[in-house]
Amino acid sequence: MRRIAAVHAVQLALNGFFLILCVPCVAPHLSYTDVLNEVIMAQQVDAPVPAQQTRSLYEGMALYGFDTDARIALIRRGIPASTISRLSARMGMSKEFLLSSLGLSRATISRKEKDASLLSKDESERVLGIETLIGMVQAMVEQSGDPAGFDAARWVSDWLSKPLPALAGATPASYMDTFEGQKLVAELLSMTQSGAYA
């Protein structure tokens, strides 16, 4: 019964409602992967999903704490191109700088935003890499003290554009265009919590 309720909550999220956050409360023993897999199985996996539905699902998730399988499912589906503009605004970073850092074509992203379409797997993965960094920083601040008034997105934006000795004077932003570069940047960010590269 709980599995059905959790799957129903996710299906409502796919239909444009922001109920995905109810899933842990309704069925705490189920992983997000279990629920998301049930939804994907209930729908035709190859059927196109409108960008509005995917945006609702994407925006309702706490992506940093999300398990790997669920993140992969989201990447495979694609996230809305409009996510980039909202992310840019949240970070206080110019859209051009964000696109350049991620190695994304401005013309392609503009066309996809205009058409309200989804990003490709590769594009989605790069954008989610930034979201992961923001989630990491928020989690570190919450573990270390009082997060009141702290803006993780703005902090990450500032940190990405500063040259780091650990990167031989390069900026973390210059590594964000590849998955391996994003892993390196995430590792460096984790080391800042212990003071290794503060």
Image: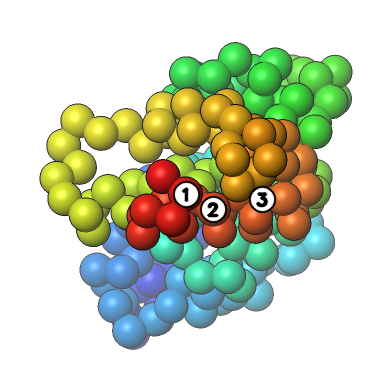
Looking at the picture, the colour scheme in use is rainbow
Disc 3: which residue: 182
131 or 165: which is nearer to us?
165
Residue at left 85%, top 18%?
A: 107
Q: Nearer the viewer, mark 1 or mark 2?
A: 1
Q: Amino acid at mark 1?
A: Tyr
Q: Position of residue 15 (x, y in %)?
A: 51, 48
Q: Which mark is residue 197?
A: 1
Q: Position of residue 150 (x, y in %)?
A: 25, 34
Q: Nearer the viewer, mark 1 or mark 3?
A: 1
Q: Position of residue 197 (x, y in %)?
A: 47, 49
Rendering quarter of residue 53: top right
Rendering quarter of residue 81: top right
**Element carrying mark 1:** loop
Q: CA distance from mark 1 to mark 2?
A: 7 Å
Marks 1 & 3, CB-CB < 8 Å contact:
no
